[in-house]
Image: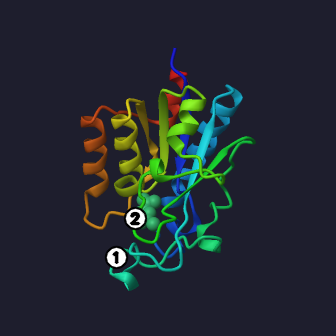
Amino acid sequence: MKNSALLIIDVQNDFCPGGSLAVTGGDRVIAPLNRVAAAFAAAGLPVFATRDWHPPETSHFQAQGGPWPVHCVRDSAGAAYHPDLRLPEGTVHLYKGVDEQRDGYSAFDGADQTGTLLESLLADRSVDHLSIGGLATDYCVRSSVLDALTRGLTVTVLTDAVAGVELRPGDSERSLNDMRVAGARLLTVEQAVQAH
Ligand code: VGL
Ligand code: ZN
């Protein structure tokens, strides 16, 4: 029997339409994520949610030589969860990308507000399988999925609950393929909920 948890990555205003690093269709992940989060909560399974949570100046941003426009600066409106996202009571909140010198794409770079890393939060709950959705397919979702697989967890990627930045057209498709080749299962939310 698998001990599953849901991991929701970076469904924040800055990654949604109107935000400073908007992902095309970023807000389309919200309805499927609300559905799967409710199903996990109803089954008593843990839900984790990350926020990209950057300092005002970081090597992640273009002004400091990095790849990205300013986004998800800690405590800003852009860093808040999208207001339509419904996180169940008891959701464990993780902060990532808090460092001035690192991109911190992976949820495994993230920690809760006491500084406990995701890996140890998962171990505490004997989690061995993660269902993962959110933003962005080609950066934080990809990196989190590959890190989870490296750590020996099994992973389902929720294909209708992810969307990509697509700096290069096709990046999302290529990323999904990389995740599949690395061992992740690709399912829609509907298929994943049925499987539980
Ligand atoms: C992300 C680019 C920069 C992500 C975060 O959440 O995928 N992408 N920072
Ligand atoms: Zn970022």
Question: Going 33% across and 74% down the picture, which residue do you hit?
Answer: 67
Q: Nearer the viewer, residue 152 or 190?
A: 152
Q: Is residue 149 visible?
A: yes
The residue indicated by pointer 2 is 103
Residue, far bottom: 63
Whether 133 is drawn above or below 28: the answer is above
Image quadrant in which the C terminus is located = top right
Q: Is mark 2 within 8 Å of ligand 2?
A: yes
Badge 2 or badge 1: first in the primary sequence: 1
Q: Is residue 23 visible?
A: no
Whether residues under marks 2 and 1 lie with C-beta atoms below 8 angstroms apart, the answer is yes
Residue, far right: 89
Question: Going 34% across and 55% down the picture, which residue do you hit?
Answer: 138
Residue, far front: 115
Classed neighbour count for the residue bearing mark 1: other residues with Cα under 10 Å, few (<14), some (14–19), many (≥20): some
SS at badge 2? loop
Side of 142 where 181 appears, left or right: left
Question: Going 42% across and 52% down the picture, which residue do you hit?
Answer: 106
Mark pair 2, 1: CA separation: 9 Å
Whether 121 is drawn above or below 167: the answer is above
Q: Nearer the viewer, residue 65 or 114?
A: 114
Side of 106 where 73 appears, left or right: right
Question: Going 27% across and 57% down the picture, which residue do you hit?
Answer: 171
The residue indicated by pointer 1 is 66
Residue 139: percent from left, percent from top: 37, 57
Residue 57: percent from left, percent from top: 48, 80
Q: Nearer the viewer, residue 68 or 59?
A: 59
Identified by mark 2, the residue type is Asp
| Picture quadrant where residue 101 is located | bottom left
Residue 68: percent from left, percent from top: 38, 74
Side of 109 where 51 appears, left or right: right
Residue 130: percent from left, percent from top: 48, 34
